[in-house]
Amino acid sequence: MQTHAPHVSDDVQVLAFDVFGTVVDWHGSIVREMAANYPHVDGHSFALAWRAGYQPAMRRVMAGELPWTLIDDLHRLILDGILPGFGLAHLSEAERARLNRVWHRLDAWPDVVEGLTRLKKRFVICTLSNGNLNLLTRLSKRAALPWDCILSAEVFRAYKPDPRTYGGVASTFGVRPEQVMLVAAHHDDLTAARGCGLRSAYIERMWEFGMQEPKDVSPQAGNELHAKDFVALAQRLGC
Amino acid sequence: MQTHAPHVSDDVQVLAFDVFGTVVDWHGSIVREMAANYPHVDGHSFALAWRAGYQPAMRRVMAGELPWTLIDDLHRLILDGILPGFGLAHLSEAERARLNRVWHRLDAWPDVVEGLTRLKKRFVICTLSNGNLNLLTRLSKRAALPWDCILSAEVFRAYKPDPRTYGGVASTFGVRPEQVMLVAAHHDDLTAARGCGLRSAYIERMWEFGMQEPKDVSPQAGNELHAKDFVALAQRLGC
């Protein structure tokens, strides 16, 4: 398998990973949390509603309508907004705080630990997520993710797709942009990374939005690599 | 051993580790590097001279005489200054760059990997070093240090002993200062951390400055814990 993409990987030193959806199954984890604690709620719709508030909330921060805000706090803002629509307006402060921390307890996709462990032998592997450092650290510790470094929007004080995040990975590690490859399950993230000179690897996560809503994971032009999962990526990169 | 210090550790969630001297043997690593590549140079004196420039260089940054500068660049400034005194003024740019990266290749003390691995089971373990993220990441990867997160002066844009660094660990992880314990082989670092409300654990590193210059490692008042090394610290903390 090592002969598939030598031109892509020869010069790459750093693999930076998107986290929500790419590394962890946010939808399934939230569905399981709701089924365990609030079984009368439609967990699928709840997870989608919570996640749907995410991009608009970040845009408000980047537009200056809100001050710089950690994702934990944006998640809480969105949560408070959607609870009444799901019959959960009565949740106490402690219950809301606990539910909000479900984002610290997201489960990794089953291929992730093996894939990262193999990729780590050859590359510096780090996160590049809009999640804050606390969220990423606790999630990674619980899921035993072997990162070399946890990088976050929090470090660069800008959310993806701001160029400061993609360029920030390269400057942090003292390498050229083309020596960094972003690994993500989202084409918009990968496109923005390529716009900053990074390489890009698309990962199929067909069930990111649940079994009811399979995602179109067909290859798109532009990405240097397209892999089913992290183990397949490791094989493609000769690890 | 678990009964020795339950009052100290019960509420602690995060252990933040100083790195140079506490986790890694900068002196011995530089001496070995010089012996291998520049055997006519007195490696002991060279290592001490390089390290001696470190605090004054950071003070110049914090005083505003120099702009914010990564430690990799401060190390290089100091290196360029000391090379002529050791008969190495002729080193090329490439040789200087390679020698400067010895700080990315420092060896950990022999107890570190076992101690961290045990401590990680109970605590969030992170660095809190003036070293930049690239230096800390590459050093940690090479030495297989199992950090949950790498925190650096670079994240807080302030060097220890600035309170923003110690307080920054607590706020990053969403805990109170007294839920963070700094682990270090230097009393001034620990004293500054306690001034910010953190707990402190002193680690004996008698040979930090080489076998020729054993360090006084006798206990000092104020530190909640005093341990010979990281394995002893793990035992004290019931790990």
Image (spheres, coloured by chain):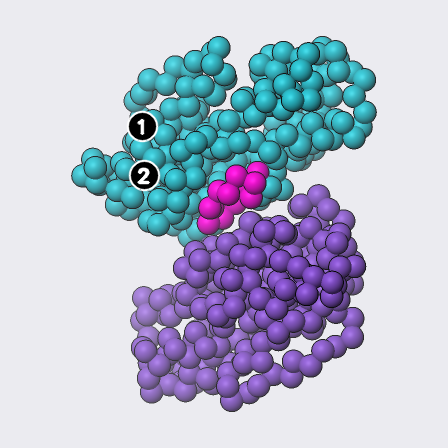
Chain colours: A cyan, B purple
The answer for which chain carries disc 1 is: A
What residue do we see at 32% from left, 29% from top?
A227
Compute the Cα span from label 1 to label 2.
Answer: 12 Å
Whether B214 is drawn above or below B56: the answer is: below
Asked if residue A141 is among those painted magenta in the image, a careful observer would answer yes
Circle 1: residue type: His
Toward the viewer: A39 or B58?
A39
Tell which residue pokes out farthest to the bottom in this image. Answer: B212
Indicate the secondary structure of the residue bearing disc 2. helix
In this rendering, position of residue B151 left or right of residue A16: right
What crowding class fits label 1: few (fewer than 14 Cα within 10 Å), some (14-19), or many (20 or more)? many
The magenta span reads A139-152
Q: Quadrant of the C terminus of chain B?
A: bottom right
Which chain is indicated by disc 2?
A
Query: Residue A212, percent across and down?
Result: 48, 10
Q: Which mark is residue A226?
A: 1
Q: According to the image, label 2 marks what residue?
A: A234
Query: Regarding mark 1 in the picture, which secondary structure is present there?
Result: strand
Mark nearest the camera among 1 and 2 is 2
- Res B233 quadrant in image: bottom right
Percent from the top left, x then y, of residue A13?
Answer: 35, 48
Counting the numbered discs, the total is 2
**Rendered view: A227 above or below B28:** above
Which residue is pictured at 66% across the width and 27% down the height?
Answer: A75
Q: Amino acid at mark 2?
A: Ala
Quadrant occupied by the N terminus of chain B = bottom right
Q: Is residue B126 above or below residue A179?
A: below
Q: Is residue B216 magenta?
A: no
Could one spot residue A17 in this view of the protein? yes
